[in-house]
Amino acid sequence: MPGLENYLALLSRVDELCGRTAERFESQISCRPGCDACCRHLSIFAVEAAALNAALGALAEPDAALIRLKAGNAAPEDPCPLLQDGLCLLYQARPIICRTHGLPLLITRAGESGVDFCPENFRELSSIPGSAVIDLDRLNAALAAINALFLQSFPGPERVTVAEAVKS
């Protein structure tokens, strides 16, 4: 889909960073296929929704119909409508939050900074090197800027739920 170039470039950088961290700390990361505790029904940026929708359009119709059906029945408190048997049906197109969740994230709230990660990960480490920590504010700023550029060409809501991204 046109307009996704900047987003796809960001995904490439995020995947590279996440891949290095996952490889370096493989024994400390519990995230595996079937682990879906963090897979909630979230809101995502419009550019991420467009990427999900493009991936949905590339699926065989029975698979796409299943996703649309699940999305049409999804409630905000439900697990992500893209989950099937603990796996993401659009894994290759998953949003950035899904790519980074569970890994060490530098988070700033109320002026206080800290590193957050899935409680199932890094249980045997007393500290995590800075090179393995993703600065969430920087990442979100880049994603928001890419989304703003996307919305200039494709006007619409800034954010939508995963279900809204794939149900039509």
Image (cartoon, rainbow, N blue to C red):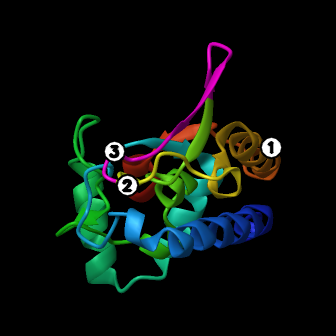
Which quadrant would residue 167 be assigned to in this image? bottom left
The residue under the point 54% across, 46% down is: 127
x and y percent of residue 63 in the render?
Answer: 29, 79
Which quadrant would residue 109 be assigned to in this image? top right
The amino acid marked with disc number 3 is Pro
The residue under the point 38% across, 47% down is: 118
x and y percent of residue 58 in the render?
Answer: 48, 82
Tag shown at residue 119 = 3
Asked if residue 113 lies in the magenta stretch, the reply is: yes
Closer to the camera: disc 3 or disc 2? 2
Tag shown at residue 42 = none
The earlier-in-sequence mark between 3 and 2 is: 3
Asked if residue 19 lies in the magenta stretch, the reply is: no
- Nearest the camera: 78 or 109? 109
SS at mark 1 in the image: helix
SS at mark 3 in the image: loop
Viewport quadrant of the N terminus? bottom right
The earlier-in-sequence mark between 1 and 2 is: 2
Q: How many marks?
A: 3
x and y percent of residue 135 in the render?
Answer: 69, 44
Tag shown at residue 145 = 1
Do the residues under discs 3 and 2 have CB atoms within 8 angstroms?
Answer: no
- Nearest the camera: 70 or 110? 110
SS at mark 2 in the image: loop
Residue that label 2 marks: 124
Viewport quadrant of the C terminus? bottom left
Residue 56 shows in the view: no
- Above or below residue 74? Residue 100 is below
x and y percent of residue 154 in the render?
Answer: 73, 51
